[in-house]
């Protein structure tokens, strides 16, 4: 078949001719001769100065390869002389034959030593703006069908850097040791992507390693869609994975998908973010953190739903949403099986004997900015040494008004409900407390909350007070309000009031010390009273207590800023043992009320009975009676 032979001859001749032409181009054309023209075109198109300091290299067979060394693109006026973009080395390799069909098939794009410096000036303008002139109208379908097409088999960026400088607040963020590698782009299929860099806040700051890897990232900018069925993201010690799908990714930024954080220690990451060492009472706090959740993100909010997480020994579940932009409210509905809040508080300060802890400064500026609402339920919570069960905590905060409550919980055999309200809108805070304890075991409460074993019993207590100031000391000093309590079957530990009365009687009558000894506690059947707070001092006029042998009524004050106690008590003996220890008190059963003084502090008080005054009163009555009898004798009846 001679025509086949002729076709082969023609084809070989064309190939040979093309090879000769390409060799001639490489041998006769020096791309460095066109540096000036290239820089001029760049200036016309971008308004920036393009510098080509290194040699340009061109190869055309078997692939078209363009190589550029030491190139930079300048900044617009007002942003400084430092380049906007600088390249150490760039290489573009394209297949030759697809060019004849108007198809740019790029085998690879290689960039090394890329430096990008993004600057936002004090007016908020960026040095990357207005680079390409006015936006060109989109091509029609007919134009697109006849225009050239392009695919890129891979992009590799190595040893690169991106600096983000904000001159409004003087902050800097740097992406150092930036490396990027992609699969084929432009084929319509998802693109494999690997990316890694070190993030810091400027020279000398601590760095955080960030790495992203996905077997396929699908992006359609015309349809504004994103599809990433699988990805992993490393952020310092954090190992995130998940999936994400998006629509309107440019115009409305609507994303949704799933996230999973592998259990890890969060202490190092928190220290990196805050720039300070993390100090907690438990050094193992934040060492076991992980979660999995669905998420949704748009221009107005970021939301986690079907959330399941772990914080050390705590298992969490529920939902959290955070507003973006002007509406930055946090909305939450969370549940926890247990939570030891004390683990995450700052270390306790060791105080010298007699030294008081410094007052706590109220975070007024934080409270003014807080915008949150939600509910937290905890199966068992530990706070300030106390243990609470079945806790329901509600929070509402906006415009400087913070309301923590109504809160309810089971507490030491009884129940608690209360509300804490803080008005932080002014120069100082106004704090309102409404607290109610029902059927509480006060021995366990005082031991846990105050490390005190001086009081026991079971009963109720109610408190409604308001204070104002900038510190905890200010609040105590300005408290106004009311309280009441009713406790049964309890004891005041440390002093035995019945024994103190017996001992005082023995001293007055010069008798031997009473039998039975000091039990060190005053047991009571009932202890009740009401009181009013004024400027941090509680005043009561109706304190009442009944023991096995005594009825007690009293009044006095308790100063909260100093914990000072000053109570004046009137004690009446209404019953004595028929025999044995205490039976000797029968001669005082009909005596006047016995004054008792209670002084000291709430945790270290003293009881001093004034039995002599009672005895003197009794003797005086007997002398009066004898005087009357003598007078009747003298007057003959």
Image (cartoon, grey):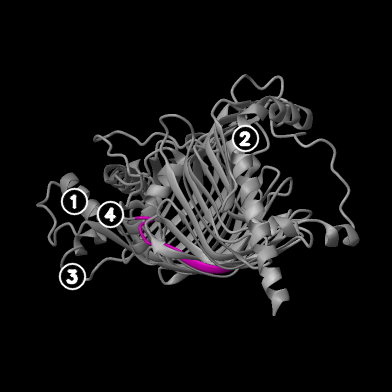
| SS state under label 1 | helix
Question: Which image quadrant for residue 151?
Answer: bottom right
Relative vertical location of residue 284 with respect to residue 89 in this rendering, above or below: below
Q: CA distance from mark 2 to mark 4?
A: 116 Å
Q: What residue range appears in magenta?
A: 285-294
Of the image marks 2 and 1, the number of the one nearer the N terminus? 2
- In the rendering, at what x and y percent does residue 135 appear? 84, 42
For disc 1, the marked residue is: 503
Residue sitting at 56 percent across and 56 percent down? 154
Observer-nearest residue: 48 or 400?
Answer: 48
Q: Is residue 430 visible?
A: no
Of the image marks 3 and 4, the number of the one nearer the N terminus? 4
Q: CA distance from mark 4 to mark 1?
A: 10 Å
Disc nearest the viewer among 4 and 1:
4
- In the rendering, at what x and y percent does residue 155 appear? 56, 52
Q: Are marks 3 and 4 in contact (CB under 8 Å)?
A: no
Q: Please tell me the numbered disc located at residue 28.
A: 2
Q: Are marks 3 and 2 in contact (CB under 8 Å)?
A: no
Residue sitting at 34 percent across and 63 percent down? 444
Q: CA distance from mark 3 to mark 1?
A: 17 Å
For disc 3, the marked residue is: 579
Q: Residues within 10 Å of mark 1 (few under 14, many from 20)?
A: many
Of the image marks 2 and 4, the number of the one nearer the N terminus? 2
Of the image marks 3 and 2, the number of the one nearer the N terminus? 2
């Amino acid at each position: 078949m001679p025509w086949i032979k002729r076709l082969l001859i023609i084809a070989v001749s064309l190939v040979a001719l093309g090879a000769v032409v390409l060799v001639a181009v490489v041998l006769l054309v020096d791309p460095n001769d066109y540096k000036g023209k290239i820089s001029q075109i760049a200036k016309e198109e971008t308004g920036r100065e393009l510098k080509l300091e290194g040699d340009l290299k061109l190869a055309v067979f078997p692939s078209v390869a363009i190589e550029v060394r030491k190139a930079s693109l300048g900044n617009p006026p007002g942003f400084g002389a430092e380049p906007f973009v600088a390249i150490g080395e760039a290489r573009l390799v394209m297949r030759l034959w697809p060019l004849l069909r108007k198809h740019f098939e790029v085998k690879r794009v290689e960039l090394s030593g890329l430096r990008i410096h993004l600057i936002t000036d004090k007016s908020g303008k960026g040095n990357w703006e207005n680079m390409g002139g006015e936006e060109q109208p989109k091509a029609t379908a007919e134009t697109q069908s006849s225009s050239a097409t392009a695919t890129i088999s891979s992009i590799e960026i190595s040893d690169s850097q991106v600096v983000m400088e904000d001159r409004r607040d003087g902050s800097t963020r740097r992406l150092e040791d930036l490396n990027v590698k992609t699969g084929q782009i432009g084929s319509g299929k998802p693109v494999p992507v690997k990316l890694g860099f070190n993030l810091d806040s400027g020279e000398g700051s601590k760095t955080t390693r960030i790495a992203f890897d996905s077997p396929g990232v699908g992006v359609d900018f015309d349809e504004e869609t994103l599809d990433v069925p699988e990805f992993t993201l490393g952020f310092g010690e954090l190992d995130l994975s998940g999936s994400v799908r998006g629509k309107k990714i440019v115009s409305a930024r609507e994303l949704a998908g799933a996230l999973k954080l592998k259990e890890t220690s969060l202490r190092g990451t928190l220290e990196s973010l805050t720039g300070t060492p993390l100090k907690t009472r438990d050094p193992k706090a934040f060492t076991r953190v992980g979660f999995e959740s669905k998420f949704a993100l748009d221009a107005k909010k970021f939301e986690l739903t079907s959330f399941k997480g772990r914080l050390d020994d705590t298992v969490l579940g529920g939902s959290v949403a955070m507003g973006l932009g002007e509406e930055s409210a946090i909305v939450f509905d969370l549940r926890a099986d247990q939570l030891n809040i004390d683990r995450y508080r700052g270390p306790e300060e060791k105080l010298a004997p007699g030294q008081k802890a410094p007052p706590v400064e109220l975070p007024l500026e934080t409270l003014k900015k807080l915008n949150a609402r939600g509910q937290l339920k905890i199966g068992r919570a530990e706070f300030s040494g106390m243990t609470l069960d079945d806790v329901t905590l509600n929070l509402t905060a906006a415009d400087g008004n913070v309301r923590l409550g109504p809160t309810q919980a089971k507490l030491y055999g009884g129940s608690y409900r209360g509300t804490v309200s803080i008005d932080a809108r002014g120069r100082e805070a106004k704090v309102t407390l409404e607290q109610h304890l029902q059927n509480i075991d006060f021995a366990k409460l005082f031991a846990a909350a105050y490390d005190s074993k001086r009081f026991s019993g079971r009963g109720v207590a109610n408190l409604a007070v308001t204070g104002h100031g900038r510190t905890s000391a200010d609040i105590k000093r300005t408290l106004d309000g009311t309280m009441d309590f009713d406790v049964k079957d309890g004891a005041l530990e440390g002093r035995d009031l019945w024994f103190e009365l017996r001992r005082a009687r023995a001293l007055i009558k010069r008798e031997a010390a009473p039998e039975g000894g000091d039990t060190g506690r005053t047991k009571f059947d009932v202890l009740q009273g009401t009181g009013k707070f004024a400027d941090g001092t509680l005043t009561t006029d109706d304190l009442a207590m009944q023991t096995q042998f005594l009825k007690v009524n009293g009044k006095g004050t308790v100063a909260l800023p100093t914990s000072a106690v000053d109570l004046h008590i009137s004690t009446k003996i209404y019953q004595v043992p028929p025999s044995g220890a205490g039976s000797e008190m029968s001669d005082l059963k009909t005596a006047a009320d016995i004054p008792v003084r209670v002084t000291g502090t709430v945790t270290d008080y003293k009881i001093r009975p004034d039995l002599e005054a009672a005895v003197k009163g009794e003797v005086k009555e007997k002398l009066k009676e004898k005087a009357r009898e003598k007078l009747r004798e003298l007057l003959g009846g």
